[in-house]
Amino acid sequence: MPDTMLWFREDRTKFYDVPVDAPVPPGDTPMVSLAGERRRVDATAIAAWEIPADVARRRFTGDVEAAWARLLDGLAAAAKAAPTPPAENPLKALGDRLRDMPVDATMARAGEKLRAALASPELASAFDEVGVKLQEVAQRLREQAAAPAPSPAGAPAPSATPPTPWAAALAAPDLRFAYTSGNAAAPDSRFGASVLELDTDGAIRLANTRAGTTRRWAGRVGPNVVSDLCAVLTAAGEPPVLPVPLLPGASLTTFTLEGGGHRVSATVEAHGARRRPEWVAVYGLLQSLLLAVSGGVLRLGTDHTDIAVDDLHEV
């Protein structure tokens, strides 16, 4: 792994190759790293690591090529370790197809698009499309890895695959659910930051912070609301992989499940997740809960379901 990280200004006018362990004091200059991290730093302190745009683009292309090589090596290693015969192994088949691609021509075309994208407004949409595709591939590989291998004739049937911590917590009778969304520090945020908590007995709590002020509500919803939330989360499956790098305008939300001796938390980029119908249902129900528990204050989105909240009061 490189011991430096490529950073660039949000307007992509300057690029910096910064040592990963370098202390960079905070400041007023907004910066984004190739890994998706965002900071405001002291422009004077980071100036020593500035590099020309063409060097940054070559560095970026080199990282892409290295990631491509690691992907192929990882697929080859996974295929060798898989229990199925090589000719039937889907990981090997995928690796073979990737290796047979005209990589030089592919990388050349990708390089041309990336060089143009690094200096154009189309960067966000280009990486957004790549991120969605990578999420889909990662989900399919996770499903393939979780599927039991076929047993040879006469061999005992394999034991059932144990549930993931996410699935186990979601099915627990003592589930406690928390959902965090928004950004209280964003100057253009209409709704600030919200934390919604729901217990399996229907107790529900909401805190919203906006413009330096926090309001809190509490109440109780019926068991059908709890079961509906568990149903849509179960249908959605494991949370999608967080895209890297994060794109400007990304909407990060955090889901926390606690129950059955498990505590698991996942950060989900809402815009990308909503491309899957199952997650549209998840966010639709959560927006309806935010509207109901806030007494109509937090009206996010346009499509809401009426939810009754008993003993609703502001605390």
Image (cartoon, rainbow, N blue to C red):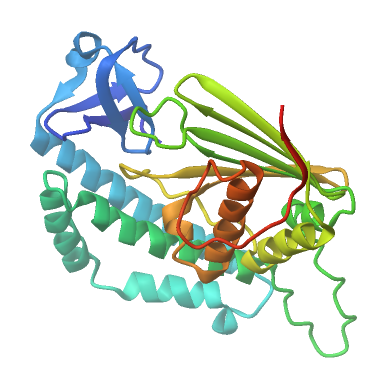
Quadrant containing the N terminus is top left
Q: In front: 280, or 291?
A: 291
Q: Is residue 301 left or right of residue 194?
A: left
For the question of whether residue 39 can be seen, the reply is: yes
x, y percentage for residue 66? Answer: 33, 48
In this rendering, is residue 119 above or below 24? below
- The tally of labels here is 0
Residue 73 in sight: no
Residue at 29% in and 73% down: 101
Placement of 152 over or under 241, stated as above or below: below
* Direction from residue 60 to residue 310 in the image, left or right: right
> Percent x, y for residue 258?
79, 43
Query: Outermost residue toward the bottom?
Result: 153
Residue beneath the point at 26% across and 15% down: 28
Position above or below: 29 against 289: above
Residue at image coords 37%, 38% = 36
Residue 47, image quadrant = top left
Camera-nearest residue between 226 and 139: 226
Quarter in which the C terminus is drawn? top right
Name the spot of residue 140 as percent of width and height, x first. Answer: 55, 69
Camera-nearest residue between 23 and 271 = 271
Provide residue 215's location: percent of width, then percent of height: 60, 27
Q: Residue at x 87, y 49 (%)?
A: 201
* Left or right position of 246 against 45: right
- Which of these two is toward me, 239 or 61? 239
Figure check: 63 above or below 235 = above
